[in-house]
Amino acid sequence: MGVSIAQLKKYVPIDQPAEQLAHELTMAGIAIEGIEKTDDGDRLLELDLTPNRADCLGWINLAREISALSGAPLEIPQIFIRENDEVIEDYISIAIDDPELCKRYAARVIKGVKIKESPQWMQDALVKAGIRPINNVVDVTNYVMLETNQPLHAFDYELLGGLKQILVRRALEGEIFTTLDSVERTLDGEMLVITNGEKPIALAGIMGGENTEINEATTTVLLESANFLGTNIRRSSRKLGLRSDSSIRFEKNVDPNGVLYAADRAIQLIHELAGGEVVKGVCDVYPQPVMPLTIGLRPLKVNNLLGTDLNDDQIKLCLDRLRFKVTGSEEGYLVEVPTYRPDITIEVDLIEEIARLHGYDRIPATLSCGVTRPGGLDDEQQFRSQIQDLLGKHLHEAVNYTFINPAAYDMIGLDPDDERRNSIAIANPLSEEQSVMRTLLLPGLLKNIRDNLARKNDNLGFFEMGTVFYPAGKLLPREVLKVGAVIAGNTETHWRKKEMALDYFYLKGLAEDFLAGLNISGVSFTAAVRPGFHPGRTAIVSAGEKQIGIIGEIHPGVTDNFNIKTRTAAFEFDVEVLYQLSRPVKMEQEITRFPAVKRDIAVVLPESVTYTEARELIKTDKSGLLHDVNVFDVYTGGQVPEGYKSMAFRLLFKSNEKTLTENEVIPLVEEILQRLQERWGASQR
């Protein structure tokens, strides 16, 4: 975008050469990409603005920056409007259906105008800014947009129809609308339109309609000055393949409190250039006014952070030049930030502004002082590295965005009232696909499986360690570090090893190995039913009284939603709980020199009894001689009553003091059988 220095001089005195001005602005963070000389001797500054300084797209705001840097006075055009005795309410009413998408809508009316060419000075200003002159009324709306950074639109009032109202609403699905460029466009329900109460007359924030265009016969003008949600304008503009100077500005967010000044300034110029009578008043709907933000600032923090020795007057001077209101004492200030600077939200933003105004080149270079020590990892960081090492032996590490599509919660089968649906919405999402902060890792990992299967990569295993976010009212979100894993397909084939399914049981073994590697003991798997998981192959993983997380086979309905055609299993654990349970030093056990004694038992148990429950009961042996319990067979069918199953256990007994005899082992086995019989009515096969 080119900005005329001659135009800027209307708002602030500029004495320095264009090259020096460009250098000063660039050093202050307003990058000037180049300087172009025009035929009339003017110089154009080519701006290369960062997204946070889109306010400088307006001439007045850029002049405000020059004024702050140089100390020269800022001269904002004063508004003087002569109004007639009629009232705006007799001409128009305004209603906003969706205040989230339309934050403010104001309108003014001027009648008796004469449409003609705008004066040469205005045409020259528009051409230098890259805008084609059309007529005096339309040119004024473009001129004031360039001046204030507030997009405007002019309607032919007589073409609005008999209702004489403005209704801002979402478009109907499939609604047809012809824009000013004579292109017929099909709209959807996410787009915002300006209507006359019945039919669309403009695409909000993007382009007006052919049906209310200013033409040579226009005598009464309805002037729109509004504020629309930038993300919605961006999405609509992309869908339609239509970008305008207005949409570019709304996409970057425009100050809603600049709406009235821009409307008054435009009406003033239309009255001067097109004549007519200005109807008294403004019809202004502003449901939720945006107030200036007040931020605390500590002078000591300013100097500590910048390495400067600025006094109270110097700090205040920088803030005063920026038109920030300052109250308080040297102990701490309260700084009121104008709403046209939405990039200033916290104390360090104010400190950056002070650094810009003071001059980065005036900040002294200093060597770091104090004792320097080699860097290292603390205990928690080492623990996270250990997690990555252990899981990395079996799985590939994935790194997914923390932003997800809220539709993912439906895809993984969360219940409508599941608290994990209560996610944090992104203020300015790039797309619907990344519009909320994730509350679980599973959607991203399942997407990894889906995308790799689509690329013919089979036999997959991924893990991810990342943060999930939960809302905490007005406080900052609660962040929880989780580790999740997902597997699908089969193990790799080998001439000495049969292919195995990467299923729930394989993942359970991997999880047991992982938890053992973290020196977490007493791990149990308790059958559970959870949304998104297979009801018969899901377990809550615990250690003692602490719940670690969940493991299970993904429900077939969920894998269908992700277009995954193979069985898939996953787990998700809380890293903080793992850290609390992990023992830093693995306990050593003396290796006995006496032989162990093995005994196999087969018992008939109710089908509802899990292996974990049976093993834990068996391990309650008080003799201290039972060292290990493993199941090696589970059988249902003939010779076993319906509703029961046969489980065969291998028991390992050993002593550090002597070789155990048969007479010593038999009572231990009988005691185990008795406990099983008392708990579940088990019988020995």
Image: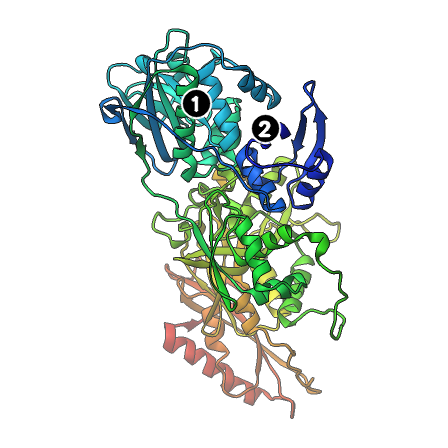
Q: Residues within 10 Å of mark 2 (few under 14, many from 20)?
A: some
Q: Amino acid at mark 2?
A: Gln
Quarter of image, res 653: bottom right
| Pointer 2 residue | 7
Label 1: element kind = helix
Q: Position of residue 94 (x, y in %)?
A: 28, 28
From what the image shows, is residue 616 above or below residue 39?
Answer: below
From what the image shows, is residue 377 above or below residue 85?
Answer: below
Q: Spatial distance from mark 2 to mark 1, Cα to Cα?
A: 16 Å
Report the side of 423 relative to 659 (left or right). Answer: left
Q: Amino acid at mark 1?
A: Leu
Q: Residues within 10 Å of mark 1 (few under 14, many from 20)?
A: many
Q: Position of residue 272 (x, y in %)?
A: 42, 19
Q: Position of residue 345 (x, y in %)?
A: 50, 52
Report the side of 191 relative to 287 (left or right). Answer: right
| Pointer 1 residue | 269
Q: Nearer the viewer, residue 269 or 500?
A: 269
